[in-house]
Amino acid sequence: MKKIFISSDHAGYNLKEQIIKYLKIKKIICADLGPKSNKNVDYPDYAHKLAKMVKKNKNNVGILVCGSGTGMSITANKHKNIRAAQCFSLKSTKLSRLHNDANVITLGSRLLNKKKACSFVNLFLKTKFEGGRHLRRIRRI
C-alpha cells in the first residue's frame, strides 16, 4: 500500500501545512514528518528523514517543501533509489512521473502559490510511470 510522506524546512512550513489541508479535503492521508512550526531548521535533516521513509517501500512517495525546492531535491537524491524531482510546472511534474518514475516531489514555497503547488501534488500523485524505454534508463541511475 502506498504511503505519502511530507516534510519541509522553516521556509516551506506554511505551504506544507496548506498542502496537508488540501490532501485532507481530497481524503488523502499523509504522514507529516515535520517540522511542527516555522522556527528555523536545517532542510537536510528533514529531507534525509523523508527519504529514509520513502525508501522503505517502493510504492511510497514523498513531498518536500523548502524555499526554492532545490536544497531538498539535492539532499533527497543522495539516497539510493530516491528520485526527487523539483517541479515548477504541470509539464515538469507529469514528466517526472511518466519518464523518471520520481518518488519525491520537491516544491519551492518562494516560487509557487498554494493553488499551483496543490495542482502539482495532485498530478504527481495520480500520474503513473510509463515504463518501457524509460525503465532501462532508470535502472542506469
Image (spheres, grey):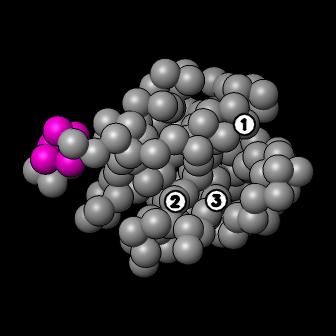
Residue 28 image point, x, y percent = 75, 59
For badge 2, the amino acid type reads Val
Around disc 1, counting alpha carbons within 10 Å, would you say few (fewer than 14), some (14 to 19), or many (20 or more)?
A: many
Q: Specify start and end residues of the magenta stretch as a single range.
A: 133-137
Pick the residue in front: 41 or 67: 67
- Disc 2 versus disc 1: distance between alpha carbons? 15 Å
Q: Is residue 79 left or right of residue 108?
A: left
Q: Residue 141, labelled with which disc?
A: none
Question: Counting other residues with Cα less than 10 Å from the Cα at mark 3, is it few (<14), some (14-19), or many (20 or more)?
Answer: many
Q: Which residue is mark 3?
A: 6
**Image spot of residue 88 (x, y percent):** 53, 25
SS at mark 3? strand
Q: Which residue is mark 1?
A: 118
**Place of residue 123 in the rendered image (x, y in percent of width and height, measured from the top left):** 60, 36
Q: Main secondary structure of the magenta part?
A: helix
Residue 2: x and y, percent?
A: 56, 68
Residue 135 magenta-highlighted: yes
Who comes first in sequence, dot 3 or dot 1? 3
Helix, strand, or loop for circle 1?
helix
Q: Which of label 3 and label 1 is nearer to you? A: 1
Viewer-side residue, 85 vs 101: 101
Assign the N terminus to one quadrant of the image.
Answer: bottom right
SS assignment at label 2: strand
Nearer the camera: disc 2 or disc 3? 2
- Check the image and report above or below for 72 versus 7: above
Left or right of 56, for residue 12: right
Q: Which residue is mark 2?
A: 61
